[in-house]
Image: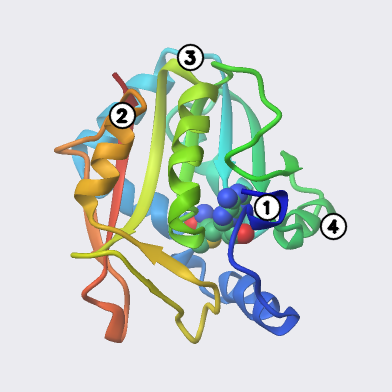
Amino acid sequence: MNNKSYGPDRMTGREKKKFFGFYKTHRDRALAGFLKDITKIEINIKTISKYLMKRKKINCLIMGCSHWANPGDTMNFLKSFNNSLYINLVVLDALPNALIEIIKHNVNCLPILTPAQKTPFLGNYFDIIICDCLLTCCSFDQHEPVVREMARIIKKSGLIILGIVHSKKRITFKMSERPIKNYSRPLKEYEKLFNKHGFNFPKKSSVETSLPGKWAQMKIENCIVRVK
Ligand SMILES: C[S@@+](CC[C@H](N)C(=O)[O-])C[C@H]1O[C@@H](n2cnc3c(N)ncnc32)[C@H](O)[C@@H]1O
């Protein structure tokens, strides 16, 4: 894989504008909505609460930051579990669009332009990694290197808050309102992949939602994955 093939499939300038613009008007489809979904079940609230209550400081990474408001929403979400927590928040994306806006809006986080499968971080650095639909937005051959990198940079006690789109068989598709190529594979394949790299794919933590309209047969799995 050469450097050019990291990240989403190539989009035209107009497609990129539409894709990143989408999150400005659809906050419920950005991290704010995802994090709300995660806490729809009690066990997830308990897991995050237990994890954050006993910590004074955490290092948190958002993998795939498509909108500049995502870091602020994440801070508010984590602080709602422990208001005195110090959060060192880092966000990455393979495309600069969202990251540039983070700088323009002076958002309190460190934006890093890097592919998720080749990050500059030291091993065992992050307590929490939030990865909502990044795997859906990059080709199948990138999935394993991304999961391997997560396994390298997450602490042994860490939590991955994960959102993935899955379907009965492997498919790719593009939605008109978010013109990025989507890659969806069976949930079993994701489970195998995460297990292979030392994660415990959850049974009870999953909150399943569907994509809208004609894409409703595609399910979104929102869950917390733990290091084994
Ligand atoms: C669906 S969006 C993420 C949505 C965001 N997490 C949210 O919930 O609002 C996927 C993002 O991941 C980025 N991305 C996709 N593949 C990537 C990769 N291999 N490395 C880094 N960023 C990637 C895309 O550029 C895009 O901004």
Counting other residues with Cα less than 10 Å from the Cα at mark 3, is it few (<14), some (14-19), or many (20 or more)? few
Tell me which label, 3 or 4, sits earlier in the chain: 3
Q: Which residue is mark 1?
A: 94
How many discs appear? 4
**Residue 198 on image: x %, y %:** 33, 23
Residue at disc 4, secondary structure: helix
Q: Is residue 126 left or right of residue 41?
A: right
- Ligand 1 closer than 8 Å to label 2 CB: no
**Residue on which disc 2 sits:** 196
Place of residue 85 in the rendered image (x, y in percent of width and height, measured from the top left): 55, 23
Q: Residue furthest left?
A: 204
Question: Does 124 appear above or below 115?
Answer: above
For marks 4 and 1 on the same chain, the one whose residue lies earlier in the sequence: 1
Give me the residue at 80% from left, 57% from top: 100
The amino acid beneath tag 2 is Lys
- Res. 55 mark: 3
Disc 1 C-beta below 8 A from ligand 1: yes
Identity, as a three-letter code, of the amino acid under mark 3: Arg
Q: Residue 104 got which mark?
A: 4
